[in-house]
Amino acid sequence: MKLYLLRLILLGSLALLAGCQGSSDRPVMKIGYMNCNSAEETMERFQPLTKYLSDKLNVEFQAVPVDTQDFAERFAGGEFEFAHTNSLVYLILHEEQQATLLATEKRGNYGSHTAGAIISKKGSGIKKIEDIKGKRVIFGPQLAPSGYLAQYDLMLRNGIDPELDIAYYAIPTGSFKHEKVVYSVYFDQFDVAAVPALDLELMTRAGKVTADDFNILGQSPTFPYCTFSARKDVDADLVKKFRQVLVDLTEPDTVDYQGETLKVLASAWINGFEALADSDYDQLREMAKRANMPPYQEF
């Protein structure tokens, strides 16, 4: 009987606690985070940042993992007010839904920018971009600006039509796609790979590969990296404050999350944020237009 009463008291306490938590008068808003390697990894990286934004802006932000291919449709459907995506998806949201640019993520050697590289394995005899013709090529995901678009455009600008001049090309499936692209060349499954310069940098730094393993056949101009944006109907004052919180983040800043005190930027694998102008994305726009890619494709 005592155990039964104890259970009732415990259940009642939990219900009361849940009611108190649900009665917060803070507005509730959602942030859509584009999945990179997996939804689980995305949430692990960005939940602390989401909590930090909630604390700073007095808004109950909820993190939502979103597949890249689904992002534009779900954003258009009003599922979330803010978005964290790669820079090409930002262009799609900006052109189709008039999304507002907030801030650009800084990571790696290029800071708020990134680039795409084309590589072959050392000893393969493929030493320059012209050698790609007639070879087997593996690209990253099709909406990856530094894993597909930049290299596709680079080939076009060097007189190589990927649809006509390459023997065969493929796009990997599953998680950790960019690493799969690198390893596909490393283990001789493909002759040439389209890889983000950042991923090659990170894999080299982690000792997974070395700089001596590959030939760099070409590299694209730099363009903005992953980007925060907001729906056009979000309150302008909140948008301004959201941007400022991101830009003001520094390496020592922490957040209390699930009983731990975590460094916000380190948890998200980010070095910081920069407030770029929309015109800084024009380089990427021109790439997408030349490659007939969204949001500028012509059928």
Image (spheres, helix red, strand yellow):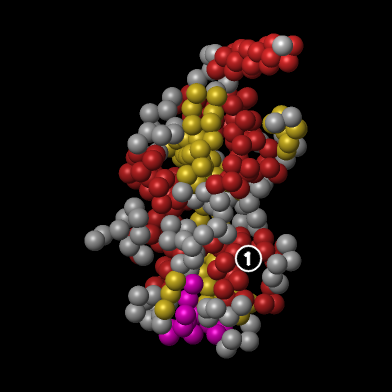
Residue in the foreground of this view, choosing between 251 and 279: 251
Q: Is 49 left, or right, of 299 in this rendering?
A: right
Badge 1 amino acid: Leu
In terms of image quadrants, where is residue 268? top right
Give the answer, above or below, for where 269 lies relative to 159: above
Q: Is residue 24 visible?
A: no
Give above or below for 55 relative to 110.
above
86 or 80, which lies in front?
80
Membership of 207 in magenta stretch: no
Residue 208 relative to residue 194: left or right: right
Quadrant (top left/top right/bottom left/bottom right) for the C terminus = bottom left
Q: Residue furthest front?
A: 1
Could you tell whether 199 is left or right of 212 in the image? left
**Res. 125 in view:** yes
> Of 64 and 117, which appears nearest the observer?
64
- The residue located at (49%, 31%) in the rendering is 30
Residue 247: x and y, percent?
60, 37
At horizontal 42% and vertical 78% (from top left) the residue drawn is: 168
Please tell me whether residue 128 belongs to the stretch shown in magenta: yes
Horizontal and vertical percent position of residue 209:
69, 70
Residue holding disc 1: 200
Residue placed farthest to the left in the image? 299
Q: Is residue 254 above or below residue 190?
A: above
Give x and y (percent) for residue 70: 40, 47
Relative height, residue 19 to residue 290 (above, below) = above
- Which region of the structure is painted magenta? 126-138
The residue depicted at 46 percent of the width and 64 percent of the height is 148
The count of marks equals: 1
